[in-house]
Image (cartoon, rainbow, N blue to C red):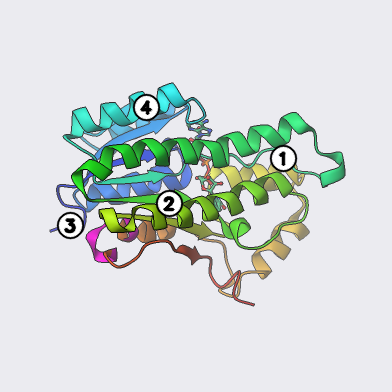
Amino acid sequence: MGILDDKAVLITGAASGIGEATALAAHAEGARLLLCDLDATRGEQVAQRIGDGVQFVACDVTDEEQVAALVARAEEELGGLDGAFNCAGILGTLGLVGDTDYADWRRIVDVDLHGVFLCTKHEIKAMAPRGRGSILNMASAAGLIGWAGAAGYVAAKHGVVGLSKAAALDYADQGLRINAICPSYVETPMVADLFENLLGGDQAAVDAARANHPIGRFAQPAEIAAACVWLLSDKASFVTGTAMSVDGGYTAP
Ligand SMILES: NC(=O)c1ccc[n+]([C@@H]2O[C@H](COP(=O)([O-])OP(=O)(O)OC[C@H]3O[C@@H](n4cnc5c(N)ncnc54)[C@H](O)[C@@H]3O)[C@@H](O)[C@H]2O)c1
């Protein structure tokens, strides 16, 4: 018996990192899956690797028409929608607020906040008539505290936390649970890119980031996926409107 046995689950950003790890974990717990990502090549490969019957649809979460079609496809292929994990996101361009290009700012907020809003909106429309469902939105520790040099990302992730809490209140009496998850540093391609390209391979910066985790290391994607699967499942039946930290103590001080 898996904790997602027979649940129909949609995961965005599933071609890589935390989304991919959650797809694997959800499949292992019995979910029927529709995966989505902007990267069609990797997304198809991930779906095939996870197993028979796991489907993939290419979709840009910033495009409302594509998101509406994605959710309709999930309902059609999976026979309804029980759970959704809106994980697609980007780190975007880093820099001081005064040096931030408006187009760069808009791109981050578009993907990380507006994309999550569009998915949440259409998933609610699919779930509300059935009177049940669990939506999990990817925020970040940066949705709870500030990060120097990352105002767009921080603003978008704080927005995801606020959106999730407000939506949870809107639909709590209709059987829907809506939550956000807030990891700190997780060893994914996004963080590898941060360390290698954006920070120029600065080992002191990597060590400082690690030292800010009381647990003494960064997370593995599977450790975030375990929490996501639980939040999507009926095991979390009394959990809604929360922004759950899974961060090795990063935001505890
Ligand atoms: N890695 C971390 O340390 C960390 C920590 C906290 C939160 N997060 C968040 O977790 C999520 C996943 O991050 P990750 O580290 O696994 O990154 P990742 O880069 O490994 O995966 C992100 C995926 O999202 C997809 N994507 C990007 N824009 C998209 C769009 N417009 N439409 C559809 N798909 C799109 C990418 O193609 C990619 O496959 C992001 O929202 C990120 O902000 C990551």
Q: Which residue is mark 1?
A: 197
- Report which quarter residue 81 is drawn in: top left
- In the picture as drawn, the residue positioned furthest to the bottom comes out as 253
Query: Where on the picture, by quarter, is residue 194?
Result: top right
- Could you say whether the residue bearing mark 4 is in a helix, strand or loop? helix
How far across and down, in percent of the image, does residue 223 sit? 42, 60
Instruction: Find out whether the residues at labels 2 and 1 contact each other: C-beta distance under 8 Å.
Output: no
- Residue type, numbered disc 1: Asn
Q: Nearer the viewer, residue 229 or 123?
A: 123
Circle 2 residues within 10 Å: few <14, some 14–19, many ≥20: many
- 246 up-or-down from 123: above or below: below
Residue designated by label 3: 2
Q: Whole-percent x and y of residue 244?
A: 46, 64
Q: Earlier in the sequence, mark 2 or mark 1?
A: 2
Magenta stretch: includes residue 234: yes
Residue 141 position in % (x across, y down): 59, 60
SS for dot 1: helix
Could you tell me which secondary element the residue under label 3 belongs to?
loop
The amino acid on which the numbered mark 3 sits, given as a three-letter code, is Gly
Quick check: can you spot residue 40? no
The Cα atoms of the two marked residues, 3 and 1, are separated by 40 Å
Residue that label 2 marks? 167
Q: Amino acid at mark 4?
A: Ala
Q: CA distance from mark 4 to mark 3?
A: 29 Å
Q: Earlier in the sequence, mark 3 or mark 1?
A: 3
Q: Please name the residue shown 39% across and 48% down the image.
A: 21
For discs 2 and 1, the disc positioned in front in the rendered view? 2
Inter-mark Cα distance, 2 to 3: 28 Å
